[in-house]
Image (cartoon, rainbow, N blue to C red):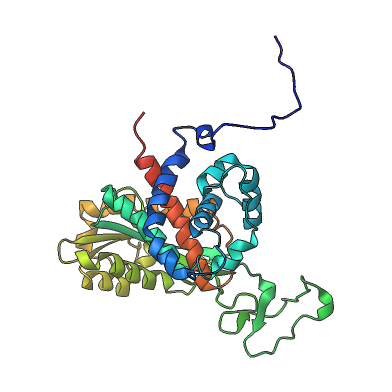
Amino acid sequence: MRGLDHKQSSLFSYTHIEDRIAPDHPLRRIKVMADMVLHSMSPTFDSLYAEGGRPSIAPERLLRALLLQCLFSIRSERALIEHLDFNMLFRWFVGLSMDEPVWDHSSFSANRDRLLKESVMREFFGGVVGIAEWAALISDEHFSVDGSLLRAWASHKSLAARDGSDEPPGPDQGRNPEVDFRGKKRTNKTHVSRTDPDALLATKNTGVAYLSYTTHTLSENRHGLIVDVHTTQATGTAEREAAKVMLERRTAPRKADRSITVGADRGYDVAEFIQALQDMGMVPHVAAKTQGSAVPEAIKDTEGYAVSLRRRKMIEEAFGWVKEIGTLGRVMLRGLDRIRGEVLLNFAAYNLVRLGNLLAPSR
């Protein structure tokens, strides 16, 4: 028989929130790994807060909430708080009970410079990589490097001449003033953004240059996990410079034991970079240019070179995830220091998703 559409809700509920989450839900594995890392960071959290005074929101809860923002493509922190208020799954992941009130969205801004800075996010990212190393899912011999532009939270209208020759917009033009671009060439040497001075004009094609940053990643070639991240200003040589920084930081303790291969695209096929890798004891598996390549012929003829060129493409999956699923499609922060922390959080979330799938029991 047809059931009745009762409108009156129950006054009390005795169901535990843990029972409402499916036993095989993917977030369960991610939560276990995230809690392991956050527990190991407890001494760091203690050093960030005063011993006395009014208790603050637990830093573990703030970081779990920001992980949800990356995992579920939530457009803003204000929208994230709305989800936390009514979404039972989100409450369970963050650690909120059904009756516990949610904090204000401004709490993220108030804690950004203290808790969400690069040093804390790098420790969290390193803890996630440590889980992958413990599970023997990371190669310590074969790596790939790449970089990608991040659109800055600033527009062309914010550009002003460095010498002060441009007249600032009048006070009567509001928040979106009229700006005449005709006949005026804007470059990083002559102009700087008033809203985000760290952002630089950059493009990877022949199209329009946008105010941007560049994020660089170092991935291992076994499962495509990201093992290091470095975010810089968008200069012409930033990718190669950042690659050397990450390789030195990641592989220095292992260089004496075995040879290390480094895959990269044609943008890294520069004599100076190839020579720098060889001086570091690494084998440059860089995609060779059709003309004027600096990659030695003896390396291009090896079987491992072909394998590295094929496996290095996995690094693009990480960039696609953090931009399409995560919050890096358009970074809604300003300043290089803040963006570095946001980038590390996004790649940590990507690694958690990958590890959740790799460590999941086979059906």
- Horizontal arrangement in the rendering, residue 233 relative to residue 155 (left or right): left
Q: Outermost residue, right direction?
A: 172
- Image x and y of residue 286, in percent: 31, 61
Quadrant in the rendering for residue 185: bottom right
- Image x and y of residue 98, in percent: 60, 42
- Image x and y of residue 22, in percent: 49, 32
Q: Outermost residue, top direction?
A: 1
* Nearest the eye: 270 or 7: 7
Quadrant in the rendering for residue 231: bottom left
Q: Outermost residue, front direction?
A: 52
- Horizontal arrangement in the rendering, residue 162 relative to residue 227 (left or right): right
Q: Judge whether residue 130 can be spotted in this image.
A: yes
Quadrant in the rendering for residue 268: bottom left
Residue depicted at x 49% and y 73%: 233
Residue depicted at x 54% and y 53%: 65
Residue 45, compared with residue 301, is above or below; it is: below
- Image x and y of residue 8, in percent: 75, 28
